[in-house]
Amino acid sequence: MRVVGRGSQVGMLLALLLAGALAGCLGGQGSTDGGSGADHGLEDDTFVADENNTGTVSLNVASSSIEVGNTSTFTVRAVNSRQQPVANINVACDSEQGVAILDPQRGYALTDSSGVMSGVIGCEAPGSFQFLCRLAVGANRRKFVTINCTGEAPSGFDGFPGAAGGGLGGGSQTDDNGDVRITAAGFVDNGTATSDSPSAGASIDISQIADCDGNATTVDVEPFYDTYARLDVENQLAEQVRFEYLQYTVSDVDGQGTEFTSKRLGLTQEADATKADSGESVTILMPVFKAYNGGKYVGDPLGTGIRITNRALITVSFTLVGKTALGDSAVVKARSTASFGDFNACGD
């Protein structure tokens, strides 16, 4: 029995030696992937973006109100988590149809040594359109600006051939004669949906944080509100227009291609009347997405409503239907693209 025991010990020793040799091989392989191969002396100057080393991106347009056929410059600046400029990082920009990106022609370019990428956009059609620039990572690494394209297309103007943009779909559209039109379309998602609400934003929070500070002894629920559509309507007719209802369609509620169209949502008399030939915009506010049980819904959450689970850029189409003082039909349409996602409003 002792002879057998010594044999087992020899076998165990051989096994340990083999295991050590194998570990040495694996260790060498690991050194190639994450050891000496990752030493700073072997790194190049390319900045690799991730959630930990990128801070924020800002977008500034020289003029957000542009006549059709004209252009405006814009700048995008990227900084890291220490608010230092990030050079040589790719910035991609896109727009709704109606706004063209003339420079950069491909729609994307690298930042310079100051963390800045600059370009030029132009208006191809009248209406209100979303313009977006973003980094490769993070929901908070993208910024929207609403571009108001005013006036009519100049004689002989045929757009900006070869320009980038248009990937976000359609923007605001007017009726055929342009006498009644939606000049701006967007959303209010911060609980301030009144006639004095500021310009509509382009980010919609679809998931509520149950406890902001994570302290089990207190309950600090994230502020979470119904989302309102905000439509600014302009009437250039010589008669008053009264809109009767609003209907909206969400292109992809769940990320699986499910399209949702709302019922006809009636408007109050105070909200729907647009004065004759006023040249001023009247703001229409209407709740469109319901905050319920920590989620955001289209339709009735206790009925046939659908929870919004698509964390992406989603286009929402609006249709306003009404009549003029002389009984003629008035129908105006608009589209607005917004970023739907998990946004943290705990500090608000």
Image (cartoon, rainbow, N blue to C red):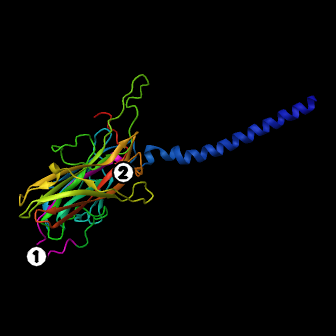
The C terminus, quarter of image = top left
Can residue 62 be seen in the rendering of this structure?
no
Q: Could you give the CA–CA distance between mark 2 and mark 1, rounded to whole angstroms?
A: 44 Å
Q: Which residue is mark 2?
A: 299
Check if residue 255 falls in the magenta segment: no
User: Depth check: 332 or 344 in front?
Assistant: 332
Q: Which residue is mark 1?
A: 155
Q: Label 2 sits on what residue type? A: Gly
Residue 113 at x, y = what percent? 26, 50
Q: Secondary structure at mark 2?
A: loop
Specify the segment rendered in magenta.
135-160
The residue most toward the bottom is: 156
| Label 1 environment density (alpha carbons within 10 Å; few <14, some 14–19, many ≥20) | few
Comes first in the chain, label 2 or label 1: 1
Check if residue 149 falls in the magenta segment: yes
| Label 2 environment density (alpha carbons within 10 Å; few <14, some 14–19, many ≥20) | some
Can residue 330 be seen in the rendering of this structure?
yes
